[in-house]
Image: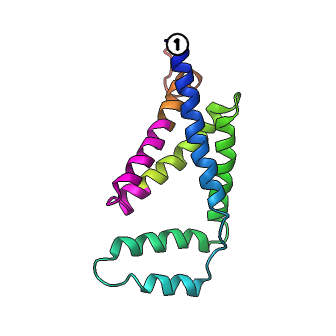
Amino acid sequence: MAKSIRILYIILRLVLGGFMIYGGFKKFETPNPQPVEVVQKAQKFTAAGHHSTLQKVLYINGAKQTGYFWQVLGICELLFGFLLIAQGTGFIGALFLLPITLHIFLFHLFLESDDIGELLQTGFLFLTNVVLVLKEKDKWKHLLWIKPL
């Protein structure tokens, strides 16, 4: 039983790490659009009924327009994904990925809630990340609970 649980945790680390590495590489796949292109794309969705699409377009392209945030996010996904997959650094990778997977899940929950498949996938990734961090609670629980003198 214990061996099968260890194998399950390894599989979860590989799945989450693989998704993060894939997402990190995808961030560098296409060049950032010019501001005029973003405005033109956003104007296509200003009609009634396209409010959520407009929000997604503006949010993602706003992150790209900073000139650094989209790339930093990609680098973090790559680095933390590799840390998660590596044997000795899995916990630190899972810990550092926690705010990223939470953000991805909340993005899909609030801006893309109509796509149930994406919502379930990102929810699974966030839940997997939480499970991987909680698995190692003995390494960090002393930071939260103060022992009486």
Residue 109 horizontal/vertical position (percent): 37, 55
**Who's the residue at 49% across and 12% down the image?**
1
Residue positioned 61% across, 44% down in the render: 18
Amino acid tagged 1: Ala
Please identify the quarter of the rendering in which residue 93 is found: top right
Residue under the point 67% across and 62% down: 71
Above or below residue 76? Residue 142 is: above
Q: In this rendering, is residue 59 above or below 41?
A: above
The colour scheme applied to this rendered structure is rainbow
The secondary structure making up most of the magenta span is helix
Residue 18's place in the image compared with 46, above or below, is: above
For this view, does 149 lie left or right of residue 49?
right
Q: Quadrant of residue 89?
A: top right
Measured as percent of width and height from the top left, residue 45 is found at 39, 81
Residue 83, relative to residue 46: is it above or below? Answer: above
User: How far across and down, in percent of the image, does residue 75 sit?
Assistant: 68, 54
Camera-nearest residue between 7 and 98: 7
Residue 38 left/right relative to 28: left
Residue 30 lies in magenta, yes or no? no
Residue 136 visible, this orientation: no
Quadrant of residue 88 in the image?
top right
Element at badge 1?
A: helix
Crowding at dot 1, Cα within 10 Å, few <14 / some 14-19 / many 20+, comes out as few
Judging by the rendered image, the residue that carries numbered circle 1 is 2
Q: Nearer the viewer, residue 1 or 78?
A: 1
Give the x, y percent position of residue 36: 57, 87
Residue 74 seen in this snapshot: yes
Q: Is residue 119 magenta?
A: yes
**Range of magenta residues:** 107-128
Residue under the point 60% across and 36% down: 14
